[in-house]
Image (spheres, rainbow, N blue to C red):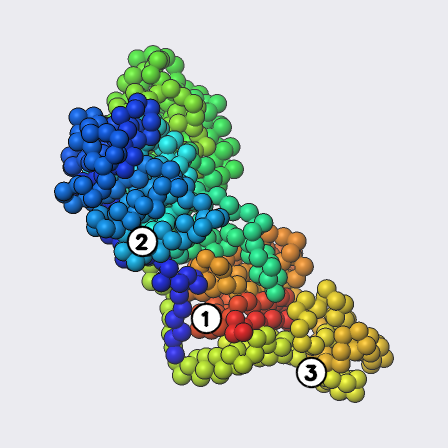
Amino acid sequence: MKVEFLSSKTDRTTSPSAMFDLSRLLAPRSVALVGASPRKGSMGHNILEILLSSGYGGKVFPVNPKYQEIEALKCYGSLEEIEDPVDLVAVAVASQNVQPVFESIYRTGAGSALLFDRIDDRQGGDLQRLRSQAIEHALPILGGNCMGYHNFLAKTSVTFNSSRPRQLGGIAAIAHSGSVFTQFGASDPRFRFNLLVSTGQEIAGSVGDYMDYALNLPSTRALVLFIESVRDPEAFRNALEKARARRIPVVVSRVGRTNESAALAASHTGAIAGSNAGYEAVFEHYGVLEVDTPDDLLTSGMLLAQCDQFRPGSLAAVADSGGLRELLIDMADQLKVPFAKLTQPAISTLKGVLPAGLPATNPLDAGGPNNETYVTVFRRALEVLVQEADAAICMFEFDATDFLSFYPELSEIAKDTKRTSPIPFFVLNSLASALNEKIAEDLTDAGVVVINGMRSALVAVRNFGRYRDYLLRENSPRQGADTQDSKITELVAKWRSRLISSAVLSEFESLELLDDFGIATVRSELASNVSDAVSAADRLGYPIALKTAEKGIHHKTDVGGVKLGIVSQAELEQSYHDLRNRLGPDVILQPMTKGRLELAFGMVRDSTFGPLVMLSAGGENIELLNDRTFALPTVDHSSVVRMFDRLAIRRRFDAHRGKPAIDVGAVARIFWNFCTLCRELGDLLDEVDINPIIVDASGCRAVDALVVSNIK
């Protein structure tokens, strides 16, 4: 039996995205502007002026009962007076006047709406009423509290903040923040968009819906998102799946990544997951590239939008400065961006080209004496580096601004290199604030990406490498694909019945569940009196660990419910009496277990994306160290191995000081068994906490476990 579950608890009856066709919203044949005004500087006039100046070729209907005509266009007293069908109604009135406008929208059958003002839901339920009505009428609404959009492909801008003139490009940008939308629209023209949307409150239509629309545009080459949250997880994941299938990179800058908003949880796993765990897992699964700043967001999107070749290898770089070359090496080390290794023939060729004193290395300083050969050295060096087998992308760093360029020929060399390079190629000006807009536009017209700022350039290169690696993995055969045999079917049926009947499994039951799913556990015995405890200890062998098994105690150490290293019957009897008197008679006994290191496995139900699995350093380190990683339960075995590689504790698996290496692949298979458990039973589980798991060269064994059902 294969258990299927939604990616979150989202109720699709309240999520209208599946009903929406956004074409009438984002590429309308007609636009009605409610609140149009002839007054210069007013919102109603700015929106109308920007729409008319954007090259829009459809019909425009100003709506305001105060005027007969605005900007030489007939002005209507209401939507009902417009004789033609209206695809989009832009609502530029104060929030207290919005409801009558939407009643008119529904009466007239308009196709979509754009609401600029914020709808405050603290009083009167206006937001929920608008959302419910939109669902009922299948009406997509952009906003409220948004700044509209620029559809450069459709030559349609419905906003009160104009964009700088720019050529049509392949970057589709979606932002929750209106200020980020404005900054993107006012940014350097080297950033070339096909779509720029400010989504605001997402009354009826989520980020996932706008992503889907953008991904359906043939011109979209990269998707960049500035988001605060995901209100419709299913639509979001569906869009990411489409981006993966179409090999369109998705770059995200997400705010609100701290753990302050994490809800209280029964297990350590839930407590440390925080608000970022679900995004971490989903982004890893779909190859989403997360960045910290809007600058990195645009720069990475711009570079990736121009990359159509992804092959193994690293960065090749040519610079016109020894000092900046050294800074590049230092910064690349900090950001973990490797440089391509040069072959001996390439080194020999470069030695014959470079002036005396310049070493034939990568990155390469090619800036020699200011003579007639200065420019030709750069040309020849680039020709050599882009052909190197270990070079996957090439950077050309030179200092040129719109006010001063010592060697304008370098721009021509960049264009020639782009035309002949078998790998992606870009130009860097190391100064982030460099004034080189004209040079950048000229090079961009020739297909050459120009990045200002060394750090942003290296972040973009790192993202290029990560996306390349993701594509290579996606094209490789998956290991550990879903299989279903009769034994698993029986186990799933057995434990579904147990979980439905019990909100929290006892530790003994939890360890039994793990054993059934192929996760080895330490031998355990239960006792409810001192005589049984002594007999159990004799069978297990000293030293013994004695723990309370009383129901409702989730964190035993917090209440003094764990006694370790008991070496005699007398000590056992004394420890038992202490636990019985303070906590109750039920106990669990286990032999003391030592290993090389401790891990923890966990599962939590993320409020946005549903069940997640966690791999972490174990024991006390689960709380002391931020050494953990999350994934979706559908993760395959090769992805599980990469989860181990992301842990700082991973180095302790290697042989050192006479200790043999621990087989990471074998331990990864145990964690993959745990993922299978969570995948098959995840719809019935709120949390699972297995900590510690003792690991050494002989294998791993779970010592303690907590399983919490979501059946109330």
* Depth check, front residue: 144 or 446: 144
- The image quadrant of residue 63 is top left
The numbered dot on residue 134 is 2
Helix, strand or loop at label 1? It is helix
Q: Residues within 10 Å of mark 1 (few under 14, many from 20)?
A: many
In whole angstroms, how far apart are the C-alphas of marks 3 and 2?
Answer: 58 Å
The percent coordinates of residue 51 (x first, y second) are 24, 32
Seen at 30% across and 31% down, the residue is: 44
Label 1, label 2: how many angstroms apart (C-alpha)?
A: 31 Å
> Where in the figure is residue 390, as x and y percent of width and height?
36, 42
* Circles 3 and 2: CB atoms closer than 8 Å: no
Q: Name the residue beneath numbered marker 3.
A: 526
Q: Which of the two discs, 1 and 2, sits closer to the camera?
A: 2
Residue marked by disc 1: 683
Given the image, on which type of amino acid does mark 1 rest?
Asp
Q: Is residue 239 above or below residue 403?
A: below
Mark 2 crowdedness (10 Å alpha carbons): few <14, some 14-19, many ≥20: many
Instruction: Locate the C terminus by quadrant.
Output: bottom right
Numbered circles on residues, count = 3
Q: Secondary structure at mark 2?
A: helix
* Residue found at x 67% / y 76%: 551
Q: Quadrant of the N terminus?
A: bottom left
Mark closer to the chain start, 1 or 2: 2
Residue 180: x and y in percent read 40, 35
Q: Quadrant of residue 687?
A: bottom right
Q: Residue at x 76, y 78 (%)?
A: 584
Q: Secondary structure at mark 3?
A: strand
In the image, 380 versus 164, the foreground residue is: 164
Above or below 636: residue 152: above
Please tell me whether residue 563 is drawn above or below residue 414 in the rendered image.
below
Could you tell me the amino acid type at mark 2?
Ala
Tell which residue pokes out farthest to the left in this image.
Answer: 83
